[in-house]
Amino acid sequence: MMNVIKKGLIFVGLLTIVLVSINALQQAPTDEFVEKQFINDYNVYALQVPESLDFAGEKMPLDNPDIHERMDRELLVNTYWQSNGLLLFKRAHKYFQVIEPILKEYGVPNDFKYLAIIESGLQNVKSPAGASGFWQIMKQTGREYGLEVNTNVDERYHLEKATRVACKYLKAAKDNLGSWTLAAAAYNAGNAGISKRLKAQQVTAYYDLLLGEETGRYMFRIMALKEIMSHPDKYGFNFRTKDLYKNIKTKSVKIDTSVSDFASFAKDHGINYKILKIHNPWLREPHLNNKSGKLYTIDIPLEGNYK
């Protein structure tokens, strides 16, 4: 009798497995099912260009169809490049706290912090033309404004000093060209370049100029990032404060001598060479020449930041 019951249970079990397998095959996603789910789960929406936008208090003429379409393009490009957008939010939280007070000190509108994003993505990068640092300063311009620029020390990579140079340049451009919008454009194309185009085309405003691709998109890219980063929820960016990058607190170590080996120097201060260079990217070589006895300030992270 027990054998009969066991055989019956085994039969029922096998039958159940067969039925489940048949059902699973019947439920297997078809191409049509996958396509419908993709459409339902992933949507790309047209964006509404705000009715009013301004840069440094200067209105963008969005009632002009050309201006409206160009602004729409940059909003779309920067909204749907989500990975890059999130990285910009993260970096901005770390570096805007350094940039904003310097802009205020020099009387440069706060909106120019977005220009730094357009220039470098808030990274110490070097362009094919040789522009370097967060503010993408050319070697000659850096030297003209008092930065030390050579193979051993390049202060274009010193965020505070480079921001001060950018402020001086922008103020001079504003005085020369008459508006902050034109000053921003001149940061990309040069004072002489913008002045020449204004005169040749017999106009007085950036938005009336016919420009090349890069300078023509420049202000629209800045404005798109200002709008998106000012209203992250509106454009679908979701993050918590703890997701953002934080500025590491440091102490200042002043030296007026040469340093033969920064790896040993770093070790003597409780860090390694990599960490030293992260916080002092303007030191371009593993040693410091300093034949003139110049006073330098090196940033050393406070104890415990990298443990």
Image (tube, helix red, strand yellow):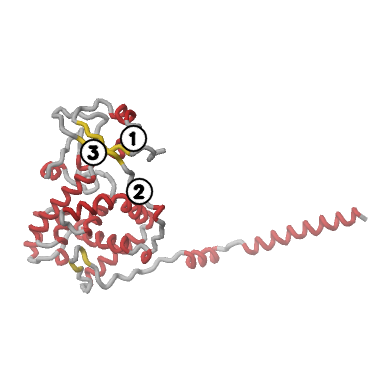
Q: Which amino acid, mark 2?
A: Lys
Residue annotated with mark 1: 274
- Circle 1 Cα neighbour tier, 10 Å, few/some/many (<14 / 14–19 / ≥20): few
Question: Above or below — where is 272 with respect to 21?
Answer: above
Left or right, 11 with reference to 32: right
Q: Looking at this rendering, what residue extends furthest in the right direction?
A: 1
Residue at the spot 7% in from the left edge and 62% down from the top edge: 200
The C terminus lies in which quarter of the figure?
top left
First in residue order: circle 2 vs circle 1: 2
Q: Position of residue 174 (x, y in %)?
A: 11, 58
- Alpha carbons under labels 1 and 3: distance apart: 13 Å
Tag count:
3
Question: Above or below — where is 305 with respect to 245?
Answer: above
Labelled disc at residue 282? 3
Q: Which amino acid, mark 3?
A: Trp
First in residue order: circle 1 vs circle 3: 1
Q: Are marks 2 and 1 in contact (CB under 8 Å)?
A: no
Q: Secondary structure at mark 3?
A: loop
Q: Which amino acid, mark 1?
A: Lys
Q: Quadrant of residue 140?
A: top left
Q: Position of residue 246 (x, y in %)?
A: 35, 48
Labelled disc at residue 246? 2
- Mark 2 or 1, which is nearer the eye? 2
- Alpha carbons under labels 2 and 1: distance apart: 18 Å
Q: Nearer the viewer, residue 36 or 247?
A: 247
Labelled disc at residue 52? none
Left or right, 206 with reference to 124: left
Left or right, 34 with reference to 147: right
Residue at the spot 23% in from the left edge and 27% down from the top edge: 259
